[in-house]
Amino acid sequence: MSLTNSPQLRLEQVSLVTPAMGAIPGIQILTDISFEANPSDRLCLIGPSGAGKTSLLRLLNRLIEPTRGHIYLENIDIKNIPALQLRRQVMLVLQEPKLLGMNVREALAYPLLLQKLPNKVIVERTETIREQLHIPAEWLERKEVQLSLGQRQLVAIARGLVTQPKILLLDEPTSALDFGRASHLLRVLIDLAIKDKITILMVNQQLEMAELFCTRVLYLQQTKLLQDTPVAQVDWKQLHEKLVQAEAQASQDWF
């Protein structure tokens, strides 16, 4: 298969099972997940708690490794790509990000300093993203403890974007933002996905936000990918009902 005709990202029968601990068997987290994504795709991962959404994101930049199956970036198995090199191309922003004791200015510049880029480039990139995301200049000297969770998420997304990744992985990026700031963030991400050909995979349980953002919906339940649907074909009312029922069932399973 030629690189020209290959998807940017491809998963083939990917499963994840936690290691067994003595007599306690491993837990199935993901089962035979297969899908593809191309530049500018915007995929929303939706599903009840425990469906494996965050674990799937972690697999894609090798924070964890699959039990079986293969993940390909531009036709190369990611297990053959050094982790640091992969994570510069496939950037993950977790739901509760850390700024590693830095202030906002330092956190935004840090990944570019690691790449040894000229100071002029660092300043230009960080200022461009800061302005695009409407991060106030007065935040720049603030440290993590001086920021709300939503503010930290926004800064972490900016920190990811300055590296100009091929793929951006976001875990519930709008969950701690008010509607106005969340809507603006999604508009910026859509523009960047289209203009810079960034592929974005986002876990988002806020269906009104997912509808605004995604080009495809991937619905996970009970460790499996049950639905991979273009956004124009999604029945959002039915999806909401399915999600509510699955969450209720997941809660009952604890008792």
Image (spheres, grey):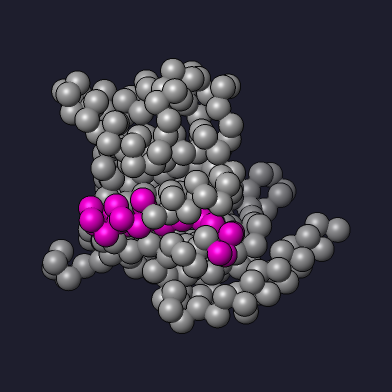
| Residue projecting furthest to the right | 255
The picture quadrant where one finds residue 72 is bottom left
- Image-based side of 249 in relation to 191, left or right: right
**In-image side of 243 versus 36 (left or right):** right
Q: Residue 141 appears at what percent x and percent y?
A: 44, 18
Give the total of numbered labels. 0
From where the camera sits, is residue 244 visible? Answer: yes
Name the residue: 49% across, 67% down.
211
Q: Give 7 or 237, whichever is nearer the viewer.
A: 237
- Give the percent coordinates (x, y) of residue 3: 15, 64
**x%, y% of residue 91?**
36, 43
At 26% from the left and 42% from the top, the residue drawn is: 164
Residue 60 visible to the viewer: no
Answer whether residue 17 is magenta in the image.
Answer: no
Residue at horizontal 54 percent and vertical 69 percent from the top:
219
Viewer-proximal residue, 132 or 60?
132
Residue 46 in which image quadrant: bottom right
The N terminus, quarter of image: bottom left
- Of residues 145 and 73, the one nearer the viewer is 145
84 shown above or below 62:
above
Classify 151 as above or below 138.
below
Quick check: is 200 in the magenta stretch? yes
Q: Residue at x 43, y 62 (%)?
A: 213
Front residue of 59/107: it is 107
- From the viewer's perspective, is residue 79 above or below residue 84? below
Q: Which residues are magenta?
A: 188-208
- Does residue 57 appear to the left or right of 77 in the view shown? right
Which image quadrant: the C terminus? bottom right
